[in-house]
Image (cartoon, rainbow, N blue to C red):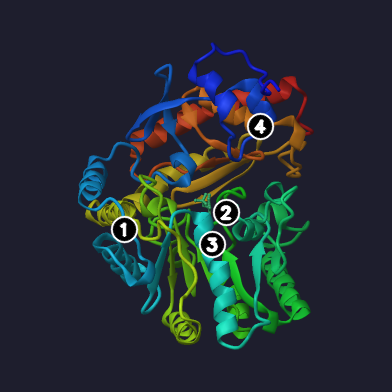
Amino acid sequence: MAKLLHNEFPPGSLHAKDLEYVLHPTTNLAAHLENGPTVTARAEGVYIYDDNGKQYLEGMAGLWCTALGYGEEELIRVATEQMRKLSYSQLFAGRTNEPSVLLAEKLCNMVPMENARAFFGLSGSDANDTQVKLMRYYNNARGKPEKKKIIARNRGYHGVTLASGSLTGLPAFHKHFDLPIDGILHTDAPHYYRGHRPGESEPQFVNRLVSNLEKMIHREGADTIAAFIAEPVPGAGGVIVPPEGYYEKVQGLLSAHDILFIDDEVINGFGRLGEPFGATAMGIKPDTMSFAKAISSAYLPMSAVTVPEFLFETLVDASRELGNFGHGFTYSGHPVCAAVALRTLEIYEERDLYAHAAKISVPFQAGLQSFAGDDLVGEARGKGLIGAIELVANKETGEPFSPTAGVGAYCAAAAQRRGLIVRNLGDSLAFCPPIIIDDSHVNEMFDKFRGALDDTTQWAREQKLQTS
Ligand SMILES: Cc1ncc(COP(=O)(O)O)c(C=O)c1O
């Protein structure tokens, strides 16, 4: 049977081969067959280049991950040297290697957690999968086999495996996959702009969300709930900055019911919010933490979960009975990935990049806010070096555009035409540039976005999409 191909690219071209051979992740597959791929050919600093040599300012740090930008020679050197010295070794059965030990030491001494220990994987999804498995294992081992459920949030994003995809609170990641699996619950997204009732103040909104969470805990029974998982500032669900007081109240409620707080730092970690960790920036005291993306600035795949002493001790006790702690990946503690991650964390400190992120976030956030008055903009929001601009059909009421109108997608494509990469999450345009950006890049980013937004406004008018 002939392959399903709709587009005519020169046979043998990269475009044609992409359409012939690649099953793309998180892509509208039908539209892709029509439109063909965009080829990223090379990258340097905060710019990427397509196969025609066109330059784009990277407004999304890849997929929220390339904190140090591209072509960082120091990481290339470390990877090359480590690959020559020890290209692979494992952490199973008590074996170890220097880069993994030193990375674990570095990370465990950074996290806001006493006597932490680190478990390594390769992706944010596997880190959160590990979290779900740890919660089961821990509660079985401590004689509370009923205490297994995990509460996640609508519009949270925690990955795509069976367990982490279940934690993710976005319907597109559940449909047709028979997700979520049993035992995963979802509570409200802490987004005041989209979630508040008419006349409801921010504190009232927070109280309602906390009360809903409390009702869920009572309905399910606290003794059936192991943990609550949250990104301090949720990213892929639209970049949501929870209101003042939200985490304090949530955390009080969780502590009262012996429910652990799993902190997903996969986007927030390592400077994104202007501090090493999103948890501290948002006033959260995490029980366990997940890391990926900026831990290695995406030069190589690496993830980590850090656990506190009490959890580790329970695992050790269980091991006395069961033997093996039966969880781990072939590439857990891959020495080349670990060496690159360790050097990445050192570079953040040597170059004072957490302070830089905090400083550059001031013009960055001001740039986002400069669009708040636009007709098409319902909300401009953000914290640190992450933000979003939400486009709406009616500025006064906040009425969204019809999802089929594709206004966010139009705006992202307009930005791309102007040499800027931003990502549309529905009709919210997300910004998450590499942490190394400077003032001139921030200006360039928002100048280009100004053009893209004007293009979109004109198009929306022509299409008569606005209702105000
Ligand atoms: C907060 C968060 N957690 C987990 C993940 C999943 O990470 P990965 O795509 O590396 O599996 C992501 C990915 O965007 C994320 O944003």
Answer whether labels 3 and 4 touch (C-beta < 8 Å). no
Amino acid at dot 3: Asn
Question: In the image, is residue 326 above or below residue 340?
Answer: below
The response on whether ligand 1 sits within 8 Å of label 2 is yes
Q: Earlier in the sequence, mark 1 or mark 4?
A: 4
Q: Which residue is mark 4?
A: 29
Image x and y of residue 80, in percent: 23, 44
Amino acid at dot 2: Gly
Residue 54 visible in the shown view:
yes
Quarter of the image that includes the N terminus? top right
Image x and y of residue 399, in percent: 76, 42
**Mark identifier at residue 89:** 1
Answer whether labels 2 and 3 touch (C-beta < 8 Å). yes
Query: CA gap, disc 4 to disc 2?
Result: 19 Å
Q: Which residue is mark 3?
A: 128
Amino acid at dot 1: Ser
Q: Which residue is mark 2?
A: 159
The response on whether ligand 1 sits within 8 Å of label 3 is yes
